[in-house]
Image (spheres, helix red, strand yellow):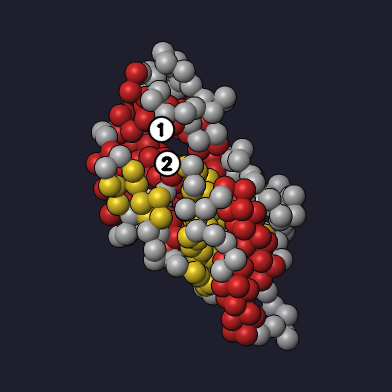
Amino acid sequence: MSNFVMRVVLVAILCLVSLGSRIPTITMSDFDPVSENARLQQEIEDQTAKLEGEIGVYAVSLSDGRTVSVKADQLFPTASLYKLLVMYRVVQAMESGSISPESTVVIGDDDVLQDEPDEGFALGDTPTVEEALAVMITYSSNAAAMALVGEIGGSTVVQSAAVELGMDNTVEVGDSFYSTPRDIARFFELLARGQLISPSASEKMILILLQQAINDRIPALLPPETPVAHKTGELDDVRNDAGIVYAPAGWYVIVVMSSEGTPDEQVEMEATLSYLVFGEYGG
């Protein structure tokens, strides 16, 4: 096991999963991964058909590469999932030394135009870059995101990060970002394997994502001790969640994105889909 994976396991799983020589795999002699994956695919299709509005799903086992998907290449509003790319650029700048994690950012007039969580920032606040980064991810602070976007050079720098990472269908249209479940999953696959910037930078981002405070979707129906490094996003009729699930029987990436629906129903559906995938890839 690489030092990167070992550190993530030690901190994230808190000794829940014993450390092996690679990402855990299922070894039951009577396990037929092809038929079981087909069964899961059908379950995912049956469940998503019940939801009013649009929903896309993409999940990939990091143990053996099996995938399930529904509308994985359809564009959805990212809502706050675009903050993953902001985080990537900020950590990249921190790694190169062009931004210090201890330097301060000033929350200005243009940074407070959107709703802000109670744990977020107000006009005139001066968090450090490190503090702004953590609150942007864990509480989805819009003010922190806007201030950090300014620090890294504007939204074009965020868009170029998607191109750099091979997220070819992730685009900015006007003031909004759109992406596909498959593109967002690519971000998390690279992250899970320590391939975003560097192993140490990937570790830094994972540890921030593990502190996510909004846990009503992917983690909601999973065993409570299951570490999930994830980011949510929401608008009026959009509910998204995406991340890495560190399950005892196998680690996997899952992305759920929905739009044009009723928020309560979207959240319930995404939690259900997560539970089904956990049962096959991680349970």
The answer to which image quadrant residue 114 occupies is top left
Tally the marks.
Answer: 2
| Secondary structure beneath label 1 | helix
Q: Nearer the viewer, residue 276 or 62?
A: 276
Where does the C terminus fall, quadrant-wise?
bottom right
Which amino acid is tagged 2?
A: Lys
The residue that disc 1 covers is 145
Q: Is residue 129 left or right of residue 174?
A: right
| Residue 44 x, y percent position in the rendering | 59, 70
Where does the N terminus fall, quadrant-wise?
bottom right
The residue that disc 2 covers is 83
The answer to which image quadrant residue 128 occupies is top left
Which amino acid is tagged 1?
A: Ala
The answer to whether the residues at label 2 and label 1 have Cβ atoms under 8 Å apart is yes
| Residue 77 x, y percent position in the rendering | 40, 50
248 w.r.t. 92: above or below:
below
Q: Residue at position x 69%, y 83% from top?
A: 31
Q: Nearer the viewer, residue 28 or 41?
A: 41
Q: Which mark is residue 27?
A: none
Q: Earlier in the sequence, mark 2 or mark 1?
A: 2
Q: Nearer the viewer, residue 50 or 214?
A: 50
Q: Residue at position x 47%, y 53% from top?
A: 260
